[in-house]
Image: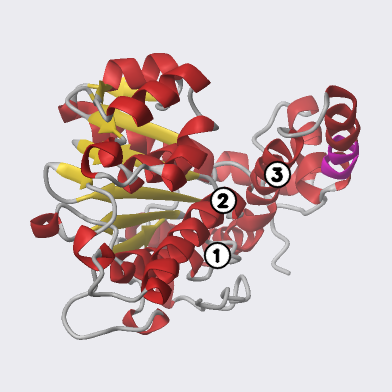
Amino acid sequence: MAALGLRAFGTKGLGWLRRNPWAPLSAGFCSRGPGPRPTSARQREGIRNIVLSDPKKRNALSLAMLKSLQSDLLHEAESKDLKVIIISAEGPVFSSGHDLKELTDEQSPDYHAEVFQTCSEVMMLIQNHPVPVIAMVNGLATAAGCQLVASCDIAVASDKSSFATPGVNIGLFCSTPAVALGRTVPRKVALEMLFTGEPISAQEALLHGLLSKVVPEEQLEEETMRIAKKIASLSRPVVSLGKATFYKQLPQDLRTAYYLTSQTMVDNVALRDGQEGIKAFIQKRKPIWSQDLVMFFLTAILLNIMPGYCEKRFHLETIHLCSRKELSDNAASLGFSENQNE
């Protein structure tokens, strides 16, 4: 399992201003076998796009695919630059589930155990990941592919998508997909899907809670990116704390759940971003989250030293942080004068 990255925030220098905005993640962050990796990953403005890239095999969750997906999820997971992850797929099938060729008696029981254990680790990793994970589905998701959708925090699908757990039809009951499915949709809906193997439409999946939203195919990427950009604009520590607490309180009784979340609210208020958000609301200004402070002060310095060049070269007036007037107002609210360079 890949180790979590611990890249220090703010140590990248100015080179990041010139790099490809959708630059792929470094090839060395995961082990590579012979042939191309079955997933690809790119990151821009806090949004990591992980793509299942084996359409010829219907994006089957082979052991290689699972390990590649696991590595893409773990890569610098603790970096403040990462705000949200989107999982999508090439081709008309999001994922057909496990690669059945790996589950014949030609492979040992130990190999079979590794396949299912790795799959379980990936699904749990999504829930335990510090940032939200969004499934962007455009096509069929079956068995472990349906499990992957159910495991994500948010799932957006095109209206042509469908979902099934058809293992029972080939003598292999979808027991592990049932874990995620049974925690996402009502019990009787899950059991009908598991007992019959029959697919449900995107609209049915939305009705039963497997999906967050269904949109026309041509609007899928736009809507998914809208949600991702909104999350990426928010405080990572606050979102991370909220996600972890949400899943922690779910299995608890009502009293314990309120006890845990009350403690979390106290911790949240004590966070730097908690106080910044409250003060920004009272002062009627945009908050400056902790992950944006380096960029905020870099922008302030550059605008003060060479404003014309910066605004023309880097379009600093239109980036997501703030305009020059807002920059001055925010600096003043933080106790800095407009001309203060340090």
Judging depth in this view, the residue of 112 and 268 nearest the camera is: 112
Secondary structure type for disc 1: loop
Judging depth in this view, the residue of 63 and 155 nearest the camera is: 63
Residue 36 image point, x, y percent: 18, 76
Q: Residue at x 69, y 46 (%)?
A: 244
Q: In this view, does 15 lie to the left or right of 201?
A: right
Q: How far apart are marks 2 and 3 (CA)?
A: 10 Å
Q: Distance between the residues labelled 2 and 1?
A: 8 Å
Q: Give the range drawn in magenta.
A: 263-268
Amino acid marked by disc 3? Val
Q: Name the residue under label 3.
A: 238
Mark 2 and mark 1 in contact? Answer it, CB < 8 Å. yes
Secondary structure type for disc 2: loop
Query: In the rendered image, which quarter is residue 248 located in?
Result: top right
Q: Mark 1 points at which residue?
A: 77
Amino acid marked by disc 2? Val
- Residue 267 magenta-highlighted: yes
Residue 321 image point, x, y percent: 54, 46
Residue 186 appears in the rendering:
no
Q: Name the residue under label 2.
A: 131
Residue 157 image point, x, y percent: 29, 30
